[in-house]
Image (tube, rainbow, N blue to C red):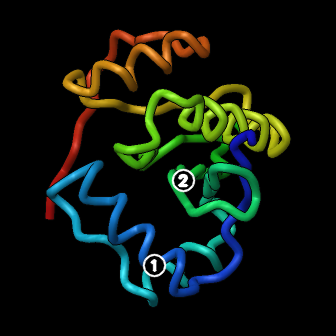
């Protein structure tokens, strides 16, 4: 059975449990979201949380991706954030399916492209993004921490 990608539409126990399992596989710098955090994301007009189920629509949640779209004076911007596929489900095309659906939704929203950042240590993820067609930009990325 193929991977099934869908928009998350409710902050239920299954999704919270999946995020508690998946977020630590992505980063140790941030805890998984609380139910209130997840409800706020799902209610946001700017954020779309995609979930991947495998095998098929009745399978468990094995991956997530957040698409952020917003309008600025020069047009619609889109970013892909927090892409993670469960360690036991990697190498089956799940990450690619998530990213391709994110790209489709960004284009549908009117964005002329999609930005993402990825830690250089995430070799497989970086290879996937390049395979899909992302180009590495020579730019300075700045971050101001509170």
Viewer-proximal residue among 98 and 80: 98
Viewer-proximal residue among 58 and 7: 58
User: Whole-percent x and y of residue 24?
Assistant: 24, 58
Residue on which the image places disc 1:
16
- The relative height of residue 52 versus residue 78 in the rendered view (above or below) is below
Pick whichever of labels 1 and 2 is earlier in the sequence.
1
Residue 47 seen in this snapshot: no
Could you tell me which quadrant the C terminus lies in? bottom left
- The relative height of residue 99 versus residue 8 in the rendered view (above or below) is above
Number of numbered discs present? 2
- The relative height of residue 138 versus residue 43 in the rendered view (above or below) is above
Side (left or right) of 11 relative to 111: left
Where residue 113 sits, quadrant-wise, is top right
User: Whole-percent x and y of residue 11?
Assistant: 57, 83
Side (left or right) of 58 relative to 13: right
Side (left or right) of 108 relative to 126: right
User: Whole-percent x and y of residue 140?
Assistant: 27, 22
Residue at 67%, 49% in the rendered image: 55
Give the number of the disc on residue 141: none
Residue at 15%, 58% in the rendered image: 29
- The relative height of residue 58 versus residue 99 in the rendered view (above or below) is below
Residue on which the image places disc 2:
66
Residue 22 seen in this snapshot: yes
């Amino acid at each position: 059975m193929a991977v099934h990608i869908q928009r998350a539409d409710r902050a239920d126990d299954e999704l919270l449990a999946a995020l508690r399992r998946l977020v630590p596989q992505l980063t140790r710098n941030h805890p998984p979201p609380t139910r209130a955090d997840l409800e706020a994301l799902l209610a946001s007009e700017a954020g779309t949380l995609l979930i991947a189920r495998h095998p098929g629509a009745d399978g468990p949640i094995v991956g997530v991706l957040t698409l952020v779209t917003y309008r600025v004076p020069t047009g619609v911007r889109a970013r892909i954030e927090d892409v993670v596929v469960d360690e036991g489900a990697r190498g089956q095309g799940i990450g690619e399916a998530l990213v391709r659906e994110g790209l489709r939704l960004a284009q549908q929203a009117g964005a002329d492209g999609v930005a993402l950042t990825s830690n250089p240590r995430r070799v497989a993820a970086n290879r996937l993004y390049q395979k899909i067609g992302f180009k590495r930009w020579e730019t300075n990325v700045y971050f101001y921490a509170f």
